[in-house]
Amino acid sequence: MKEKFGFAPNTDEASRQAFVASLKKFVNFDVEAQLADLFDNQLVSAANSPPANRDEAAALLEPHPLYQLWSSLTFHSQNLMWDAVQTTTDRTIEDQVESYRALSQSPDCKGSVSLSDKLCVKAPVATTEIHRQPGGYWREKRSDDIEAALNYSGTVDLYRNAKGMGMGAKPSADAIGQFVAAIARKYAPDLEPRSVLDMGCGTGEQTLAYKRAFPDANVTGIDVARPFIRFAHGLAESEGMAIDFAEMDAGATAFDDESFDLIVSIIMFHETTKAQVHDIMRECWRLIRPGGLVLHLDVPYQPDRMPLVKQVTNNWQVRHNGEPFWSGFADLDMKEEAIKAGFAPDSAFATYEGQGPAIYHFFGGRKPS
Amino acid sequence: MSGNISETDADSEFPSGPRPGNRETTFFDDPVKDHLLRALVTVTMELSVTRDRLASLETLLVDEGSISIDILNSHMPDLATAQAREAERSKLIQDVLGPLVKRLAQAD
Ligand SMILES: C[S@@+](CC[C@H](N)C(=O)[O-])C[C@H]1O[C@@H](n2cnc3c(N)ncnc32)[C@H](O)[C@@H]1O
């Protein structure tokens, strides 16, 4: 093994990536603050009648050059971000694939990876370049490919810095998974899970947190993107952690009924569809054991919590940033969805919990013992 | 894998989004404005990268007297230096783009 497993920029690449994070921070905070100010103090008062909904607000904003500047910079920062991580990936990919092979073929393997040629990848993952990642999540360019996952993982730190969450003492790479585990303890203090399922586990960084939080539990991660599942396996093995990964659709898994005590996901649902939300919640109800907890985390952009101007900039993500279900997800009542899937109204929940400056939407339910 | 992609999913009716590979969408009344803005951002980025590299080069030279290209290429700043550089980066972006944002936010 030549290199450490994972995304590893050199000096110039790291500083280009840091610049893109700073640019995103400037656009997300400074420019958006000016935009909100412009909207509240100039555009609304100059309008014939105040905008009543997102579309009316968009109609006020779209012709304004400050909104056009915000759009142009946001779009360009995404181009720059993918270019910046791709440079690192291009330089290191062959070594990284080698490392993956060595890790996955090692006799010391603690966990496993299982790929399925029968899996049918659905839209939007199949059809859309989600947040405009070139080639999307699942395409492969070589055997044992992990390229899409390497690129994705290169953006995780960058996004964290762009949200103003990095640059202090660095949060650990599995901080969100740790947070989900802590919320699981808060919502089900009596539960000592023996088996945990992480749906839409992606590159697996957060999946590691569940094994750390519940060392005696069997932990499984599933995802529809093959390069991600491979990467997750390589990452877990490189950390010496026993986790099983499988290429599977969260809405149609191959597990037996009542196989898990804790089922979690992190920012998966907003990358699905209405039909898949329904299927996945039903699958959670089927897979969870009596007494078990289903706990999903996703973005907190429900319109009743967002000022109109923020609703407009969020909806821009649908049109221009490859987030087709961003607004559709935010419009759903996830407690209702849990109840429709089988959870009792008094055990189903849709809540908000904060971690530092970040707020997340949690939803799911418990099955009676 | 392409044989296993379902495009006919009943729910794949999405609001129109960017075409795969599209990097060229523009937002101003005149697309030249978008392209000039993007060129400006790229130049700013490269200036920032050059400043970081120069700072690393200086640090290593002062500390070591001479350096190898490998050490320079893999040099990563410590936390305090990273924070100082981030402050400089933010200031550079403010200096280049701030006046434009401020002007556009003003009433005509
Ligand atoms: C934004 S990523 C988050 C990954 C990971 N949970 C994390 O926090 O790093 C969302 C993931 O959900 C996966 N995904 C989307 N739809 C899925 C489905 N129906 N079944 C399983 N995974 C899915 C995507 O492939 C992607 O890896």
Image (spheres, coloured by chain):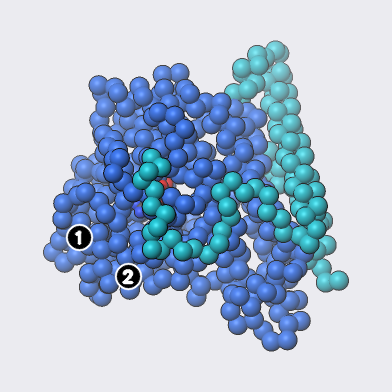
Chain colours: A blue, B cyan
Tag shown at residue A295? none
Q: Chain of mark 2?
A: A
Q: Would you say the beta carbon of the disc 1 residue lies within 8 angstroms of ligand 1?
A: no
Q: CA distance from mark 2 to mark 1?
A: 14 Å
Helix, strand or loop at disc 1?
Answer: helix
Residue kind at label 1, given as amino acid type = Arg
Compare marks 2 and 1 and give the one earlier in the sequence.
Answer: 1
Which residue in the rendered view is the most extreme toward the bottom?
Answer: A49
Residue A332 seen in the current view: yes
Quadrant for the N terminus of chain A in the image = top left
Task: Categorize mark 1 by other alpha carbons within 10 Å: few (<14), some (14-19), many (20+).
Answer: some
Out of A140 and B83, give the one closest to the viewer.
A140
> Residue A226: horizontal and vertical position, in percent?
37, 40
* Marks 2 and 1 on same chain: yes
Q: Which residue is disc 2 drawn over?
A: A337
Residue A315 placement (x, y as % from top left): 57, 65
Amino acid type shown at disc 2: Glu
Q: Are circles 2 and 1 on residues that touch, CB within 8 Å?
A: no
Residue found at x 56% / y 58%: B17
- Return the residue at label 1: A286
Residue farthest to the left, as pictured: A369
Q: Quadrant of residue A285?
A: bottom left
